[in-house]
Structure formats: structure tokens, C-alpha cells
Image (spheres, helix red, strand yellow):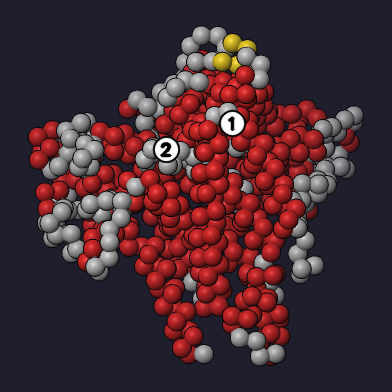
Amino acid sequence: MRAGRIAAWTVMGLAVLVTVFPFYWMVRTALTDASHLFSDNFSLIPEHFTWANFKRVLGLSTITEAQAAGGSGASLDFVLYLRNSIVYTAVVVVVQTLSCAMAGYALARLRFRGREMVFAVFVSALMIPPIFTLLPNFALVRNLGLLNTFAGLVAPILLMTPFTVFFLRQFFLSLPREVEEAAVIDGAGLWSVFWRVALPMSKGPLITIALINGVWTWKDYLWPLLVGQEEDSRVLTVALGVFLQQSPNARPDWTGLMAGSTLSVIPVLLLLLVFGKRLANSLQFTGIK
Amino acid sequence: MSAVTQAKPLFKTVRRHNAEGGQGWAALLFLAPTLLGFAAFYIYPSVRGVWLSFTDWNLLSEPEFVGLGNYAELAGDPLFWRSLLLTGYNTVLNLAGQLSLALLVAALMHRLTKSVVLRATLLLPWLVPNVATALLWLWLLDANLGFVNQLLDAMGLPTHGFFNSPGEAMPSIAAVTTWASVGYVALLLYAGMLQIPEQVYEAAAMDGAGEVRTFFRITLPLLRPVLALVLVVSVIGCFQIFDTIAVTTKGGPINATKVIYYYIYQEAFTHFRMGYAAAMALTLVLIMGALTYLQMRLMRASNSDLG
């Protein structure tokens, strides 16, 4: 049995190594002087250590400095893209969670005609692959003149996704009704029961769904690629794609690209440090996007 | 899914709310933002998408009705059929890798540890934007200077073209997406394993069943509902692969990785053939719907042996 446990832990350790090592290599490359990248290929620590790659992707160095550090000299402003990503994610998460909580609450607690039908329609929308609605949505946002604006970027998912409504409705159904009923007897109206009683009791699931949606929005690429091309509305993922295209084909600017990629991983890492336990424990809910 | 669970209304004792049709107006206010978003970005585009698939439209002039023209073209478009095949190929590669590795990791975790740190670590690749993952592996798998080829070379093994080679590009992409999602899938399966009652394992241990036997005779069969869900979610995910391909191969080399999502994207936004792209997208909706239905039927997903 002992040998079996050792073997099992060895496999587990291997899995962790394969998971973590590529990230280590990302950071190690980002911290290596570009001109030495290909000479000391195997050293685990960056032998020619430098912050220059981070400086230039953050737009903190002059064009000549950037070119000297291996860049193409094209303007890079990851501070801006990072800010755009954060704004995009934060706005979507806050508004969508709130709006869907209202809807989920109505679908779970209020009595009105067509309730089950509304819910069934939302659930069936879970089955539509995003690319199908993406084409007409792009045309709509374009017609409204919202290309390259934050409004266009957030529009399709700002007010709802069927999954968030579904998730929160299921949660409100599982919430014991007694507290809310007591509030009603005390003369509280619908809105204050929702806002003062039901929402505070739902902090956990609200944080969970906000985290899940936050991760999805942070990772989002296709829609921002279509709608947020210009600098002012360019999020990190799109910026990384553009960066790769600007970089010469024969010799991609690996040190800069890895510095940019590292910047997109850092917020995720922070999230994991703060909410790791909640994320790890609430995964069964994320089955359906 | 408990979609049919009856939601009992709150406030049933309060007269003034219950006068006629229940709390219709209040509900309308609560649902207003969601219904607006749903109508504008789900219903309207769905209807418009169906209509567009019967038209010829380059985004600039007015859409021109062409009847079933797009679908006729689709039927005779070798690239379309090839893109479906490639999507299927990628899905099979991913499922084989993802499910077997994730099952292994989940089973080990289930028997070894409840460590949150370990689970959070395994989840990391799933949390990172696909674009960053793709860039990272584009670098690691670089044909000349990438770490993997250097390693292979140092071990005296032949190096590979990976993304540059028509034969290896699709498996390389499948490997990258597998790497990015194994931890996530493993955690889903692990959560399912935690649902299996401990007594079952105690009984098995009493009967002298070894670990491997216990896994195949107890864990795997009792995991079926979770496996079915994971399978459906994975297949849906694999059909929608885009980010990784857009960054690494752009559908190449020589269309070797032009999966259906990428083909639709190119037709719509590079060639501005919105009608044709919409026809492909609608076909994809139907295929995915049929596949999901079939999988749920085959796996009898809603029945658990635990009763």
C-alpha cells in the first residue's frame, strides 16, 4: 500500500509540475534580456535579468529603449489595456449580477402569469452557441455606432446571461422563506424584502456567480476583438493578439509577449489567492456557460 | 435540471398583492432589465440570424434575399465539411486527453487529499485568458527555439514543427486546450466523487477490493451523471474553440486547423459574407443541439445509480 501511495503522489506532483512550469517559463522569459534569450536556453533562472520587457510593454520606456530591448518600437500601453480590461470586467460583473438577481428573485418568489414560460425560454437560450447571436449582435452594435466604445463592448452581456439568471433563480428557490415572510408581516414591501432581506442572505452565491462571470469576462476574446479594436476600448486579450501581429514573424518578440501575458495572469493569481477556496469549492455550478 | 421545480410565491398571505393576476406589475419591474437585455441580444439576433442565413449581405449594402442559396453552397463547400471534420477531430482528441487525465487526477485527489491549495493550483490554467495560454504555448512549442524542442533535442529525440506542421498543428492545439482545461474538469469530477457515500468504499474495502478495482467498479459507474454533464460541457466547449486557433495558427497551415468557429469568423469578418456565415452558424446550432440531445439520451444523464 505504501508503494501505491508514493506512486500516486508522484503522479500528482507531476501534474502540478506540468501545470505550473509553463507559467514559470513565461515569467522567466519575461525577465530575460531579449538579446540573450536564445543563448542561455536551459537555465532555470534568467541569467541576464532585466525589468526592461515589463517597462516597455507598460509604455514606460522610450522607443529607442524599447527597440534596444528587442521590441518593434510600435506603441504599447498595457497600463491602458489593463485598465480597460478591469473596467470591462467590473462593469459587466456588477450590473449583470444585480440585474440577474432581480430577475432570479422574481422567477423564484413572485406570482405572475407566464412565469414558468419566461423561465423555460431563458433556459432554452442556454443551448444557443454564442457565435449564432454574435453575427447579428455585431451588426446591431455597428448600426448603433457603438464600435470601439465601452457601451458596445459590454452591451450583449451587461443586463443578463441566461446562465446567471438560472443560477440565481435556483439559489433563491433553495433559500428558506421564513425570514422573508417575517419581513412581509412586519409590513416590508417587495423591493425592501428583496434588497434588505433576500440579497444580504445571498452574499455567498452572489460572490460565487460574480467570480465565475468575472473570470469569463476577463478571458473574453472574440467579442472584444470585433468591437474593441481601437486603443481606448482595447482589452488585454485583444492587445496581446495585436502585439503578436506587430511582432516580426521571423523572430517574434517573445520577451515582450511573455511580459504582456504575465500581466494578464497577475490579476487571476490575485483572485485565486483571495477567493481560491470559494472558486475550488463552487466549481460544480459552472457546468453551463 | 430542476427547471420544472415549482416556485411557490412569497407574500401569498398579503391580499393587496394578490388581487388579480398575482404580482404581475412588480414582477415586470424586477424582470425589466433582464427582459430588455434578452430581447435585444438574444431574441432579436436569433430571429435576425435565421433571416440573414437566407440572404447575401456584405455589411455595407442592403441584405439581398437568396432563398436557400447559402445552404446549397454550404452543401457543396468542401472547406465547410472539412471544418466540421476538423472540429470533430479536435473534439475527439480533447475528450480522450481531457477525460482520461482529469479522471486520473480527480481519482488521485479523491483518495489522497482535500487540499484547497492543490485544487486552486490545478485550476490556474483554466482561469488564465486563452490568448495568454496560446501565446505561452506558441513560445514553448516554437519550431526552432521553443523549450519543448530544445528539451527533445537534448534528449536525443527528433524535434517537431508543432503549430507549423499541417499534420501536427491540430493535435498541438488540442494538447494546449487539454492542458488548459484538465484541472478544471478534474475538479468537476472530484466534486462528483465527493457525492459518493463513504460507506460504499468501506464495503468495498471490507470485501478486499483493491484501489484500481474500486475505481472501475464503484467510482466510475456511480460518477455517470457527473461524467455525462462534463462530457456535454466539454463537447460544447470543443465545438467553440476559437481563441487558441486565432492566436497560434489562424486556421493554417494550409487550412489544417480551420475549424468551424474559425471558418465562420473568417467568412463573416474577413470576407464579409454575413449571410453565408449565418447559414453556417445556424447549421452549427442544429448540429450541437442534436449532439447534446443524443449524449444526454445515451448517458441516461438524469438517472443516478445512487437513486
Q: Which residue is drawn at 57% across and 20% down?
A: B275
Residue B181: horizontal and vertical position, in percent? 48, 55
Could you tell me how far apart the alpha carbons at marks 1 and 2 are, in whole angstroms? 19 Å
| Viewer-closest of B198 and B87 | B87
Q: Is residue A259 above or below residue A137?
A: below
Residue B232 screen position, x and y as percent: 63, 51
Q: Do labels 1 and 2 share a chain?
A: yes
Locate residue A36 relative to residue A144 in the image: left or right.
left
Sequence-wise, the earlier of marks 1 and 2 is: 2
* Mark carried by residue B254: none
Numbered disc 2: secondary structure? loop
Report the mark closest to the observer, 1 or 2: 2
Give the camera-side residue of B147 and B110.
Answer: B147
The one of B71 and A27 positioned closer to us in this rendering: B71
| Residue that mark 2 sits on | B255
Relative to B114, B35 lies left or right:
right
